[in-house]
Image (cartoon, rainbow, N blue to C red):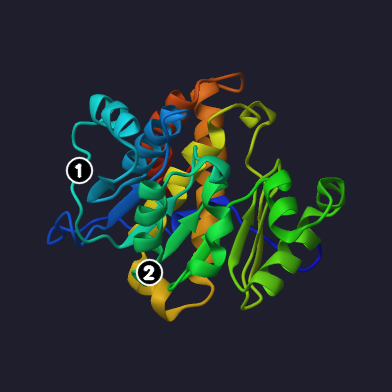
Amino acid sequence: MSSYTAWTPADAAGQIAVPGENDDKYSRGVLGMITGSGQYPGAAVLGAEAALHTGVGMLRYLGEARAADFVLRRRPEAVTAPGRVQAWLLGSGMDAATRDPETAGRLEVAMSQGVPVVLDAGALDLIDKASGPLLITPHFGELARVMNLDKDDIAADPAGAAERAAGELGVTVLLKGHRTYVAAPDGTRLVAAEAPSWLATAGAGDALGGIVGALVATHAEEIARDGGALARLAATASVLHGLAARHAGSGGPFTVLALAGAVSGVIAGLVGDDPLR
């Protein structure tokens, strides 16, 4: 724990890309998403909702057809045609064991493009396919499977587990939990502790994926030249996620859609004259 630096709302405020008068939808960042499935289409909706409230110029959703229908019904501004992206969010709401060939092909194409990738849940088996900067966002059980470790051992020392995973896998790791530990291969070690206990709810991780995906898409050029950038953005996503949960529930329980909707206000507070704490 001593090697980790606490990441605060004030730190997070410096990682928000505020658009200028000359920005357009492409310069603001395009996030590609291949998330959700026929079994879990809601994961795609939650990720898209959170990403759009975090701020991107365009969200390009290329997942399963049923999930795409759900996304478009909720967010008609989402684009479902292929095209350029600045970053990918892959795997939320998927199960690698039931992956069909068409989905596998789409994931492989995304991983081969050399842009930053956020890997979640059902795409964590594709770590070795990445051709660009890679961030993984496992919970304890998922990291245990990736690293062939015991989940209880990770729970006993999540800070050490995140650090070990970053070193052995050569990727930036966001290890979800009440405290979120972020470790990068360059030695960056950050911990965020804004999450209320009410965040232990289905769909919260899908929303976190959307938040971090949006931040990565809006900082793709910085990520290409700075090995610690992914870690800072991952920790920032965790801070935004936790603050949005607190605001959505006013200190109590909340729906994940309400959490996603609260992200915009949290960001406005952080980049304004009276930052939220």
Give the side of residue 121 with respect to residue 272, left or right.
right
| Residue 136 appearing in the image | no
Do callouts 1 and 2 mark residues in contact (Cβ within 8 Å)?
no
* Comparing labels 1 and 2, the label whose residue is closer to the camera: 2
* Residue in the image at 21% along x and 61% along y: 84
Residue plotted at (36% across, 34% down): 49
Name the kind of residue labelled 1 in the image: Val
Observer able to see residue 57: yes
Question: In the image, residue 145 lies at what x, y percent?
Answer: 72, 52
Residue 178 picture location, percent across and down = 71, 40
Is tag 1's residue or tag 2's residue first in the polypeptide sequence? 1
Report crowding for label 2: few under 14, some 14 to 19, many 20 or more residues within 10 A (C-alpha): few
Q: Secondary structure at mark 1?
A: loop
**According to the image, label 1 marks what residue?**
79
Quarter that holds the C terminus: top right
Q: Is residue 92 above or below residue 163?
A: above
Q: Tell me the tag on residue 17.
A: none
Q: Which residue occupies the foreground of this view, 273 or 277?
A: 277
Which residue has dot 2 on it? 112
27 relative to 98 in the view: left or right: left
- Which quadrant would residue 190 be assigned to in this image? bottom right
Q: Is residue 38 left or right of residue 136?
A: left
